[in-house]
Amino acid sequence: MRQQVFEVDSQAASPAEPRFARRAANLQPSVIRELLKAAQQPDTISFGGGLPAAELFPLEAIAQAQARALQQRGAAALQYSVTEGIPSLRAWVADRLTDRGSGCAFEHVIVTAGSQQGLDLYARVFLDPGDVVVIEAPAYLGAIQAFNAYEPRYLTIPSNDGGIDPDALQAKLRSAPVLPKFLYIVPNYANPSGVTLRAERRDRVVEICARFGLPILEDDPYGDLFFSEPPPAPLFARQAAGNISYLGTASKMAAPGLRVAWLVVPDARLRAKIVAAKQGADLHTGTYAQEIFRAFVDDDARLESHLAMVRDAYRMRSDAMRAALAANMPSHVRWNVPEGGMFLWASVGAGLDTERVFENALRDGVVFVPGRPFYPGGSRGDGMRLNFTAMDAARIRDGIERLARAIARTPPFASKRSA
């Protein structure tokens, strides 16, 4: 048999010029990660990152949990484990969701390395280039970044103070030339808007999606961070009406550095595909981190006491930010009143672009996230996301004063990119 010989053109290939896959063009750095670099100066006040308050991390309780995990689990805490996650943590997640009115079985739970991995795995098994994803506008930037790797198109649905608009969702699904692959939604204290989806809208969203055969990916990182009353029951509690998967995380309960989260998938066919995708990605989430978090939450009273302390602190910081906004902002600036979570959304009005505001704000030593990255294609630029959890009240007041000065110095302009 004649052996085929491949000739290499030395001019066409070079170690200095990797031949990337086409989809690599969609792998762009996170705007928020880049902004965090600008916030490293000690005198910079950052409303940019989605950072929990580090001074509230339960350091002693986590240290004790680590000791218990090693004492009780021994070498098993350091060994390979099953892809779906350690059984005790999966059972805890199932019980917690059941307590919140969502029927959940142990076998539905897949432990992931942070919610971001859950977003990636879900998109990986659903999306081919050109497929359509339904999202709110504005939508979580991290989800857009995860989905973009798979080259989708987006069907954006407007959101207001009550959350995503069900009438607009229904109308856009009816007129869509092809059926989208899934709806992605953050119903509780959404990132970036801080808005909570009303209970009656949750019923309608699930009903509409079920009628169109559209799966739902519900992302709920902030549901435990309510300021007065808990949010309505998750969309996942209505899973009997449709194909709903649920993302939760330890990042806001304990600490994001653990990188422990969970993707709950009742549909057995979908779950099998996600597990296979995860095996190819990392075999399993780190056993040690899972065991530490499971030991941390083994006392319900301790967990609830910690969450109550965090809620009180975040509520006071949210109040401080809104008071500072009211005292300092020009009259054309508007903002919402979140009922929990970590963010509020402010609009500077037509004719101003918050990317230009950001340039002035950075010179004044304050940063935030401009609104464009939260819209696929950067279609709207009058908004900005403000995080109120990472700074104390005094720094919040100082930062808002600086931000107000930057807005006042930014002139309106006419441009195709204006909101």
Image (spheres, rainbow, N blue to C red):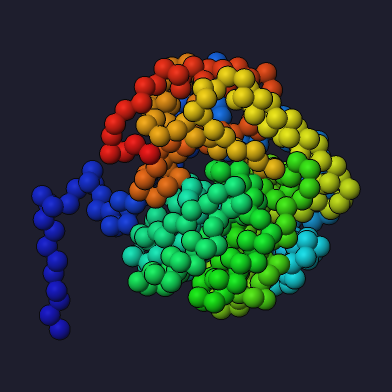
Closest to the observer: 217 or 166? 166
Name of the residue lying farthest toward the front: 331
* Quadrant of the rendered image containing residue 130: bottom left
Q: Is residue 388 visible?
A: yes
Closest to the observer: 8 or 180? 180
Q: What residue is shown at x 39% (from left), y 69% (from top)?
A: 175
Q: What residue is shown at x 63% (from left), y 61% (from top)?
A: 201
394 lies above or below 349? above
Name of the residue lying farthest toward the right: 301
Image position, residue 322 (x, y; %): 64, 29
- In the displayed structure image, the side of residue 262 where residue 345 appears, left or right: left
Image position, residue 306 (x, y; %): 81, 41
Q: What residue is shown at x 50% (from left), y 75% (from top)?
A: 212
Q: Quadrant of the C terminus?
A: top left
Q: Quadrant of the N terminus?
A: bottom left
* Quadrant of the rendered image containing residue 309: top right
- In the displayed structure image, the side of residue 173 where residue 193 appears, left or right: right
Closest to the observer: 202 or 365? 202
Name of the residue lying farthest toward the bottom: 1
Image position, residue 112 (x, y; %): 61, 58
Image position, residue 364 (x, y; %): 47, 16
- In the displayed structure image, the side of residue 24 where residue 342 appears, left or right: right
Q: Is residue 396 visible?
A: no
Q: What residue is shown at x 47% (from left), y 31% (from top)?
A: 348
- In the displayed structure image, the side of residue 154 where residue 262 appears, left or right: right
Question: How many numbered tags mark residues here?
Answer: 0
* Quadrant of the rendered image containing residue 46: top right
85 lies above or below 404? below
